[in-house]
Amino acid sequence: MKLRSPSTTPAVLLAGSVCLAATLVQAVAAQPGAPAVSTLRHSPYMPVNLSQRAKNFYGLMKGVDNLSVRRTASGNLIRFSYRVTDPVAARLLGEKTATAYLYGEASHVLLEIPVMDKIGQLRQTGPLEVGQEYWMVFSNKGNPIKAGERVDVLIGSLHIDGMIVE
């Protein structure tokens, strides 16, 4: 009778225990009543909209204030509205050729403004006036962007970051 060397016995035991553990994990996961493990975690902190410093920055440098992003039409559309304080600084918002996008930070979705056959783009364009409120609507078909999610509005070189969808 030949005896095994003491160095191979722990290796065999370790390999056997790894195989047994993998088999048990697969058996538990295959059960129909097993709870599903959620990999998506939500932050326990309340979302905070733009800070006063950011609002001052957009008002002075970008020529807009009263920024808001809201879901409309049962969540199928997202409306971005703003008030113009300086038409020269905010000129990109009124240009027809500037393409506007809404980017969802959590869902990594890039939304566009829908174009209707007889109406055109669902946004206000043309010369901007001081104190007037303007809007643009983004298509959210399938509701990839939910209420409470942070979004960025991208219009040419104008970026408005970190807004919360109401």
Image (cartoon, rainbow, N blue to C red):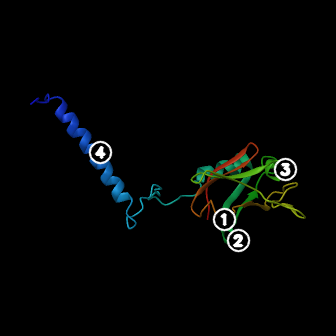
Instruction: Give the SS element for disc 2.
Output: helix
Instruction: Give the SS element for disc 1.
Output: strand
The mark nearer the N terminus, 2 or 4, is 4
Please, is residue 10 above or below residue 68 in the view?
above
The foreground one among 3 and 64 is: 3
Residue 115, percent from left and from top: 83, 59
Please, is residue 16 above or below residue 30 in the view?
above
The mark nearer the N terminus, 1 or 3, is 1
Q: Are marks 2 and 4 in contact (CB under 8 Å)?
A: no
Instruction: Give the SS element for disc 4.
Output: helix
Which residue is identified by label 2? Answer: 73
User: Disc 1 and disc 4: Cα gap in Å?
Assistant: 53 Å
Please, is residue 28 above or below residue 61 in the view?
below
The disc placed on residue 70 is 1
The mark nearer the N terminus, 2 or 3, is 2
Q: Residues within 10 Å of mark 2 (few under 14, many from 20)?
A: few
The mark nearer the N terminus, 4 or 3, is 4
Q: Can you say which quadrant of the picture contains the C terminus?
A: bottom right
Q: Amino acid under label 4?
A: Cys
Which residue is identified by label 4? Answer: 19
Of the residues tagged 2 and 3, which is closer to the observer? 2
The foreground one among 140 and 51 is: 140
Of the residues tagged 1 and 4, which is closer to the observer? 4
Which residue is identified by label 3? Answer: 95
User: Disc 2 and disc 4: Cα gap in Å?
Assistant: 54 Å
Q: Residues within 10 Å of mark 1 (few under 14, many from 20)?
A: some
Q: Can you say which quadrant of the picture contains the N terminus?
A: top left
- In the picture provided, is 153 more to the left or to the right than 115? left
